[in-house]
Amino acid sequence: MSRTAHIFLFIGYVIVAAIVGLTFPGGVLNVEDNGAWLLAGMVFLVGLLLHEMIARRQNEMTALRRLLVLRRAYDGAHEELERTRDEVRRVYEAMESVGQDAAEGGRELQEVASEVKVLHDLVEELYSTGSGKPDHALPPLPKEVEIEDALDDTAVFGSPTTMAPVKLSETDMLDIMRDALRQNRVDLYLQPIVSLPQRKHRYFECFSAVRNAQGAVITPDRYIEIAKKSGLIKAIDNMLLFRCIQLVKKIQKHDYTTSFFCNVSPTTRADREFFQEFREFLERNEDLAPSIVFEFSQADIAAHPEEVIEDVERLNKMGYRFCMDQIVDLDFDAEALAELGFHFVKVEAGTLLPTEGRDDDEAADRIKGLKRRLDSAGVDLIVEKIETEQMLVELLDYNIDFGQGYLFGEPRLSQDPPSTPLTAGERP
């Protein structure tokens, strides 16, 4: 009710009270003047009370309407806040998902960039020998399959079944190697390493071979010396190392448990610029560690102990394992090797077994002493170049851990990751 309405009503109450006071003295009730005016005052008071009651009721209704409006506004604001909160949560989740994708993409990009950098260095190394600029980029490994049967059936590494090699001049061989590096014809071959006496395939060793333009395979024993003299051996060895890494990255997509032995030649390790970059690449890819065993020759370790120890210690912290091969002196410190992360040593069968002019008992004592020291240090012995059943029978008397040689399988072309799942109770 407006202020004007209140004033008019108040004036109305006064008029009504005055009429009562003026009318009643000579009127119907026959009251005295004082009584009339008392009645008029009562009428005025009753009017004021009614007016107050009506005014309060109207104020309450107005307040109630305002409360209802406020309630609706509050409910609307609350619903809007909930919608906004849901939108913020969805945006946050989307941002988090994008962040994770970006992080994964960043890691993948970093890995690809690392591989490209290493591969670039290999190509630069090749063409620094003066063979000209590259005609083609090096393509990736061959297409993927999933089983060990993908290994090529052609034996090329000096097996008794290998055909007599064609004679090539040193110049022709050099041209073949350069062309093979340019055209991606440096192939990766794998030879199984088996547990004894079960003969189960447990690991594979990586070898390289080159092909000429007609597809003929040239094995390392035919090109290695020429490659060393020409300076191409560094590029070939580095390419083998890189190919081994590519293969390991492939097999991990299939959850295989196979590990690969990859030789780090003295030439590769002596190339400190390349090997440092390669080592940094391995450190950024620690997930490769369970699938790789790097081989260092005994002569290289003896000639450059400080450099080898530095490289091995850094990689060992990442979980990479090592094997000492090309052993000619069996009197080495097995405990020291084990502390550096060497889990294996590889000795040729001919170095262990008695030969013409050597005492059988002396050879047996040498093998037993070596095996005793290795077992004490927790290092496994791999005997390589086991060619016949007779050689194996003689070695089994000494509880050899693993064997490698043509008796168990020839090196064959790797078309894809071999599968060798572990069975219960076998050592990893």
Image (cartoon, helix red, strand yellow):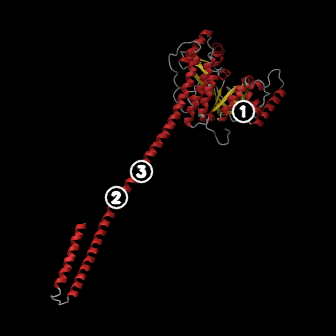
Q: Is residue 315 visible?
A: yes
Residue type at numbered disc 1? Leu
Q: Is residue 412 visible?
A: no
Which quarter of the picture shows residue 148?
Answer: top right
Residue type at numbered disc 3? Asp
From this view, report whether residue 221 is shown above or below residue 379.
above
Q: CA distance from mark 3 to mark 2?
A: 20 Å
Residue type at numbered disc 2? Ala
Q: Earlier in the sequence, mark 3 or mark 1?
A: 3
Q: How many marks overall?
A: 3
Q: Quadrant of the N terminus?
A: bottom left
Rate crowding at label 2 as few (under 14), some (14 to 19) or many (20 or more) other CA atoms within 10 Å. Answer: few
Q: Position of residue 357 (x, y in %)?
A: 83, 20
From this view, report whether residue 7 is shown above or below residue 109.
below
Q: Earlier in the sequence, mark 3 or mark 2?
A: 2
User: Are discs 1 and 2 less than 8 Å apart at CB?
Assistant: no
Q: Which residue is mark 1?
A: 340
Residue at horizontal 37%, vertical 53%? Answer: 80
Relative horizontal placement of residue 45, taking residue 222 as reference (left or right)? left
**Towards the viewer: 420 or 97:** 97
Rate crowding at label 1 as few (under 14), some (14 to 19) or many (20 or more) other CA atoms within 10 Å. Answer: some
Q: Which mark is residue 225?
A: none
Q: CA distance from mark 3 to mark 1?
A: 55 Å
Q: Which residue is mark 2?
A: 73
Q: CA distance from mark 1 to mark 2?
A: 74 Å
**Towards the viewer: 84 or 313:** 84
Indicate the secondary structure of the residue bearing disc 3. helix
Residue at horizontal 57%, vertical 32%? Answer: 249
Q: Position of residue 91 (x, y in %)?
A: 43, 45
**Towards the viewer: 367 or 10:** 10
Q: Which residue is mark 3?
A: 86
Residue lying farthest to the bottom in this orientation: 30
